Amino acid sequence: MTKYLMGMAAGIAVGLIIVAIMKWRTGKFTSVAAKAEYLSQRRARMLPAITVIFLSQQAAFFSTLGTHDDRPVTAVKISAWLLLSIVILAALATKGFWLERREVRDLIDDENTRANRNDAMRWGFLGSMAAAIVVYALTMFQVEISARDAVHIVMTVGIPAALIRWGLLERRAHRSA
Amino acid sequence: MPERLANGLKERRTELGLTQAELAEKVGVTRKTVNTVENGVFTPSATLAIKLAQALGLSVEQLFWIER
């Protein structure tokens, strides 16, 4: 349990550092619209990067799939992955940019962004369901998959599906001038 | 033949000498949303269509029409 808490703490620390850097870099904007535009463009650029980070964290899990690897380093990696999953899901479900002012958050989450986010959530849901069906079908052929592994696999497909879709839509929206 | 919502947003905006960012600020959305509406990538809600028409001094029917 302590190993998992260490992973969580490491994840929170990294997250706080990233937030501090973001706040420092966006402090130069005086207009709400300019700041919202900057953050919106940066989000479009960051979404593919977050997907890559998320998927690279999966290496720790998939390399130990079916084994009983209880080394602290693996526990820390899996905890960090879990924390990142929670943060990503929260960002997908809400406006994100939680530490920004309300008017900036409202503007960043305008009509087009909400439509893109909803479409991304739809893709995430469909990806998750497709993965769940595959996992279920595999168990019909005597493949042993624990509940924990099944959840991990479903999340591994669902979250990146939503992130990639959102990223593509946001980039297209910024680009199509 | 599928129907699509066409608009004269870009022409009217340019006529008034407004940038996408300025129009976006007038209607309370980001420049990205104005950009996607202009390019037909995104179909705006009735609320946003009315706001855009008001900001550009036109009726919604003058600004948006259905293309077949």
Image (spheres, rainbow, N blue to C red):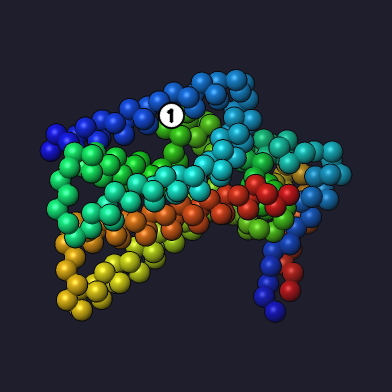
Give B44 or A134, whichever is nearer the viewer.
Answer: A134
* Pointer 1 chain: A
Q: Identify the amino acid type marked 1.
A: Ile
Residue B9, x across and y down, in percent:
77, 51
Give A142 or B68, whichever is nearer the viewer.
Answer: A142
Residue A114 in view in this figure = no
Residue A131, x across and y down, in percent:
33, 66
Q: Residues within 10 Å of mark 1 (few under 14, many from 20)?
A: few
Residue B67, x across and y down, in percent:
74, 69
Question: In the rendered picture of this protein, how many numbered marks are placed on residues?
Answer: 1
Tell me: A98 left or right of B35.
left
Query: Which residue, as the protein is rendered here, is positioned at the far right?
Result: B15
Q: Residue at x 50, y 56 (%)?
A: A165
The relative height of residue B64 versus residue A129 in the rendered view (above or below) is above
The relative height of residue A70 versus residue A148 in the rendered view (above or below) is above
Residue A10, x across and y down, in percent:
29, 31
Tell me: A12 left or right of B15.
left
Name the secondary structure under disc 1.
helix
Q: Residue at x 16, y 68 (%)?
A: A144
Q: Residue at x 20, y 79 (%)?
A: A141
Give B53 or B25, whichever is nearer the viewer.
Answer: B25
Residue B58 in view in this figure = yes
Quadrant showing the C terminus of chain B: bottom right
The relative height of residue A82 versus residue B65 in the rendered view (above or below) is above
Tell me: A50 left or right of A34.
left
Q: Residue at x 72, y 44 (%)?
A: B54
Quadrant showing the N terminus of chain B: bottom right
- What residue sits right under mark 1 in the picture? A18
